[in-house]
């Protein structure tokens, strides 16, 4: 009875099951829910949970420098997994207790970045004798960039799905101009977060596979008939999220890092991650086809953006 009561508001703690990765649904979210409730009782804010998880994750990632020690690597892997659970818990706490904040979402992104930087830096510098220090820097930077790009674009499409499905439009990033004009930089933490956020949104805008014109058509369709467009977008885009998750999901990359380090071969992961850029491009092309299918179906709707598009095609 107590157990059922404890988990009564579990569904409210997650965004939308469609955008959740399978690993999260069966592992990170249930444990994150428990941590969110316990730490909230201890007066931890979602930001406090996020920072605590980041410190755990950075400690774990740093231990990947000692890949010749199974004990150190196993402890590091366990800490990085725990950090992933805390990464779930902070957002769940915010949704459970209605303590969402703009800064909290941005800080979550910043903390994730620090955890993965520690993993890449420690993991690749273990091979300094093999690839030289400069070689390790080059490999780490390229692989880290691919990781960051994949994660960035995956978050973009999750945010788009949450927006167009009517679940949570706040998961979309604001435009760069809006951020420059409105982002509060009054504290040191905010000043440090600001350039990271600008870079994040700029890379997202430059590398997303969806044209702004297509987004405008979707927005007009949503305004014209939000329920009908919600069902159309969900039907067409649901499977694409699974594709993005398999190629770009943080759980896939996190677990692959841990497994490679347990075998003392983070370098193999780094090279495979770089090669996965080709899969990333392939999923992007599939996403374009899905977007075009949605636009084609919208041609039977009577609203301005599609009519203007049809006129441009005729010309």
Image (tube, rainbow, N blue to C red):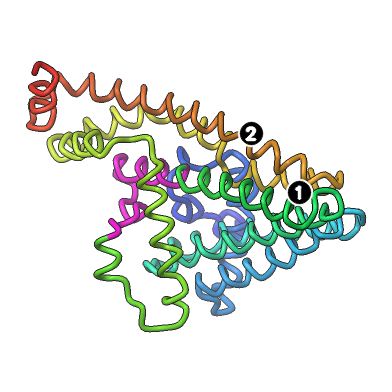
**Residue at position x 51%, y 53% in the image:** 10
Q: Which residues are magenta?
A: 154-176
- Residue 228 image position (x, y, % from top left): 21, 30
Residues marked 1 and 2 touching at CB (< 8 Å): no
Q: Residues within 10 Å of mark 2 (few under 14, many from 20)?
A: few
Residue density around tag 1, few if under 14, some if 14–19, many if 20 or more, within 10 Å: many
Residue 58: x and y, percent?
69, 66
Up/down of 293 relative to 267, above or below: above
Q: Indicate the position of residue 13 as horizontal and vertical percent values.
A: 47, 55
Q: Which residue is mark 2?
A: 275
Q: Is residue 211 above or below residue 47?
A: above
Where, quadrant-wise, is the N terminus in this rendering? bottom right
- Decide whether residue 106 is among the magenta residues: no
Label whose residue precedes the other's in the sequence (1 or 2): 1
Q: Nearer the viewer, residue 124 or 66?
A: 124
Residue 303's image quarter?
Answer: top left
Q: CA distance from mark 1 to mark 2?
A: 18 Å
Nearer to us in this view, 143 or 119: 143
Q: Judge from the rendering whether residue 5 lies leftward or rightward of residue 172; answer left or right.
A: right
Q: Is residue 54 left or right of residue 46?
A: right
Q: Mark 1 — residue?
A: 258
Residue at 28 percent of width and 56 percent of height: 175
Q: Residue at x 47, y 48 (%)?
A: 152
The quadrant of the image that shows the C terminus is top left
Residue 263 figure quarter = top right
Disc 2 element: helix
Q: Total marks drawn? A: 2
Please name the residue shown 48% across and 67% down the image. Answer: 107
Dominant secondary structure, magenta: helix
Name, please, the residue furthest toward the top.
314
Q: Position of residue 199 (x, y in %)?
A: 42, 58
């Amino acid at each position: 009875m107590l157990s059922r009561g404890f988990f009564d508001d579990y569904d409210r703690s997650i965004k939308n099951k469609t955008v959740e990765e399978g690993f999260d649904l069966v592992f990170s979210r249930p444990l994150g829910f428990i941590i969110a409730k316990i730490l909230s009782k201890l007066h931890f804010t979602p930001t406090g949970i996020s920072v605590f998880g980041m410190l755990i994750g950075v400690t774990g990632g740093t231990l990947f420098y000692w890949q010749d020690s199974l004990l150190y690597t196993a402890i590091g892997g366990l800490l990085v997994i725990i950090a992933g659970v805390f990464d779930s818990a902070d957002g769940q706490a915010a949704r459970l207790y209605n303590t969402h904040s703009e800064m909290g979402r941005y800080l979550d992104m910043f903390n994730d970045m620090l955890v993965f930087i520690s993993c890449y830096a420690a993991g690749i510098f273990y091979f300094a004798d093999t690839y030289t220090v400069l070689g390790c820097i080059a490999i780490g930077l390229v692989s880290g960039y691919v990781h960051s790009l994949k994660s960035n674009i995956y978050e973009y499409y999750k945010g788009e799905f949450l927006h167009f499905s009517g679940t949570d439009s706040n998961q979309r990033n604001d435009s760069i101009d809006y951020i420059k004009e409105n982002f509060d930089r009054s504290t040191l933490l905010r000043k440090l977060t600001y350039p990271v956020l600008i870079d994040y949104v700029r890379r997202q805008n430059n590398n997303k596979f969806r044209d702004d014109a297509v987004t405008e058509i979707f927005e007009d369709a949503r305004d014209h008939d939000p329920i009908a467009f919600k069902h159309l977008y969900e039907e067409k885009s649901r499977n694409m999220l699974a594709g993005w998750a398999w190629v770009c999901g943080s759980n896939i990359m996190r677990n692959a890092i841990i497994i490679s380090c347990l075998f003392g071969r983070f370098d193999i992961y780094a090279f495979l991650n770089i090669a996965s850029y080709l899969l990333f491009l392939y999923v992007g092309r599939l996403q374009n086809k899905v977007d075009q299918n949605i636009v084609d179906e919208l041609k039977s709707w009577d609203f301005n953006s599609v009519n203007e598009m049809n006129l441009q095609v005729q010309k």
